[in-house]
Image (spheres, helix red, strand yellow):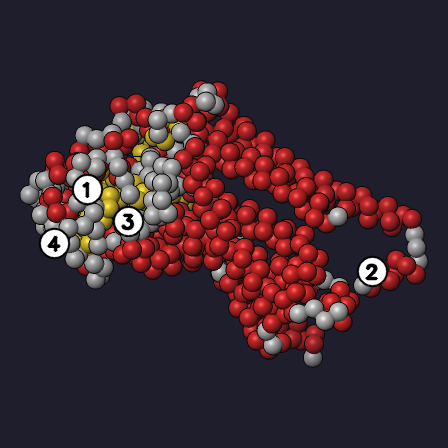
Amino acid sequence: MIWSRHNISSPSASADARMLWLLRGAAGTATALVLLIFLFLLVESWPALRHISIGRFLIDPSWNPGESMYKLTPMLSGTLYAAGGALLLATPLGIASALFIAYYASPRSASIYTRVVELLAGIPSVVYGFWGLTTLVPLINQLHPPGASLLAGILVLTLMILPTIALTAHAALFSVPPDYLRSAAALGISRWGMIRGVALPAAKTGIAAGIILAAGRAIGETMAVLMVTGNVVQHAASLFDPIRTLAANIALEMPYATGDHRAALFVSGLTLMLLVMMLWSLAAPLGRNRDA
Amino acid sequence: MKIISAIHYMIFTAVLLSGSGWSQPVNAASQKLVLTGASTIAPLATEIGRRFESQHSGTRIDVQTGGSARGINDARNGTADIGMVSRPLKPQEQDLQAHTIAWDGVGIILHASNPVAALSRQQIADIYTGKIDNWKTVGGRDAPIAVVNKAEGRSTLELFLAYFQLKNSDIRPHVIIGDNAQGIKTVVGNPNAVGYVSIGAAEYEAGHGVPIKLLPLDGIAATVANVRNGTFPLSRPLNLVTRAPPEGLSREFIDFTRSKQVYDLVEAQYFVPVSVR
């Protein structure tokens, strides 16, 4: 605030130019970091890509690096199933709780509820994983053994991304111009009609951004998922089958991997990064269209 | 007033600094040993390192985990002074020098409520390859078996596979775990699970009321005592490895880890001191 007032009172071209270069530098650093990480992954996985043809990551009979078999597709499907399932559960729940805070709750209960959701966002992932391992997995085991399963992973991930979706959706709803809502009220539209016809369409972009953010977290989450999904490398045929995600694969085997095995783990990291980039490029124009 | 208190403060600080040996850090930093490798050995090495440091002022023992494979690698390329390897050296690793500091056994664990009291070698192999998938077949209750296996690269897995003459791709696991603690928690959480972990870790947890039990192997009880007298078949040496015959501080430390002065530390971790065998 003070800074901008100072700038207005004594407008100087040189300060603007300095700021411009500072911001350019910061933006450039951020971009360079992503590129460097990508380059690093490429360099580290190069030995595997050279020794093992890319097709083998798709058609090898199994993932057994000790026996030179490197099939990645079950982990790709595991990652997508777990993240997709969590998004399916967390998106309606998150948007519903944002609507509750914004339009239905009394100011007092809304502030308590917001605090609780914020607290939920701050719990470290390993705590969720530990809770899942000691409570959720035995429960699912009573329902359908062995307990450590895709379902456990989806439930833990849902808990973890729910606050992200709820908080960003609430922020998006909060920034809907109050004039819109007053106009809707003046037209005599019911509260639900106002939410469906005015608030949600106006907040669409913000809500979509929150979902994308949550998807990124769900795909990349490692420790919590590692502890509850059983980590068996296979295509899940049901919710109760154990799966392994790409991120869990790296965390599970990296400390003990050498040579081609290590490089193959970097290939799974590279795959993970390509997956996130692909989702991003699919989702980005979606957000822009909705904006228009 | 202010000036006097400032002077007092300065004197106080100066006394503190000289008293705490702040003036001679250069000498202290010069003696440092880096150990990397097996997570089984790391806690023991840390304890021994602490005692070594207290007896040799000015030395620092830095212990990092990362598995036996990292221990071999780091010792070979010199990243670490000493590698920690929880298995015998393989034929292609004979360029390194191994110094056994203790022994450890790998035991099959079940949930304490599981009525099965013993499994034969063939039965364990059949369970792990999926030929037996219900506890009823081996005299237990009518419930599906949850097979807990270790992740690729762990030395416990290699030891287990070699002993039962299995290939990891033949195993049909339901859960794959990383370290011993996760394995024990998984079996505690599932009364129908079977897993294998370090006997030291399992006996410690079972002794502290955790509901697991260790199965005998070939009729020999899986206890620290039987690893100690050499009768338990599924056991492994815990090695410190060096690239060349150790000298100087490395040699002093390795001799120390094999000496009687640390037996209590080795036994506190439920391992077996080396020269008792």
Label 3 vs label 2: CA separation? 60 Å
Instruction: Find numbered disc 1 in the image and state the secondary structure of the residue it sits on.
Output: loop
At a point 10% along the width and 44% down the height, the residue shown is B138
Q: Nearer the viewer, mark 1 or mark 2?
A: 1
**Type of amino acid at the residue the image marks with label 4:** Pro
Circle 2: element type: helix
Cα distance between the residues tagged 4 and 3: 18 Å
Q: CA distance from mark 1 to mark 2?
A: 71 Å
- Taking A196 as reference, is B167 above or below it? above
Q: Residue furthest bottom?
A: B1
Q: Is residue A234 visible?
A: yes
Is label 4 in a helix, a strand or a loop? Answer: loop
> A37 or A285: nearer the eye?
A285
As shown in the figure, which amino acid type bears the numbered disc 3? Pro
| Residue B51 at least partly seen | no
Among the two numbered marks 1 and 4 on one chain, the one whose residue lies closer to the N terminus: 4
* Callouts 1 and 2 close, C-beta under 8 Å: no
Q: Which residue is mark 4?
A: B115
Residue under label 3: A146
Location of residue A235 (image quadrant):
top left
Q: What chain does badge 3 belong to?
A: A
Residue closest to the eye, A285 or B58: A285
Q: Residues within 10 Å of mark 1 (few under 14, many from 20)?
A: some
Tell me whether circle 3 and circle 1 mark residues in contact (CB < 8 Å).
Answer: no
Amino acid type assigned to the residue bearing label 2 in the image: Trp
Looking at the image, which residue sits at the far front?
A: A188
- Quadrant where the image shows the C terminus of chain B: top left
Q: Quadrant of the N terminus of chain B?
A: bottom right
Q: Residues within 10 Å of mark 2 (few under 14, many from 20)?
A: few
> How far is mark 4 from mark 2, CA to CA?
74 Å
- Residue that badge 2 annotates: A3
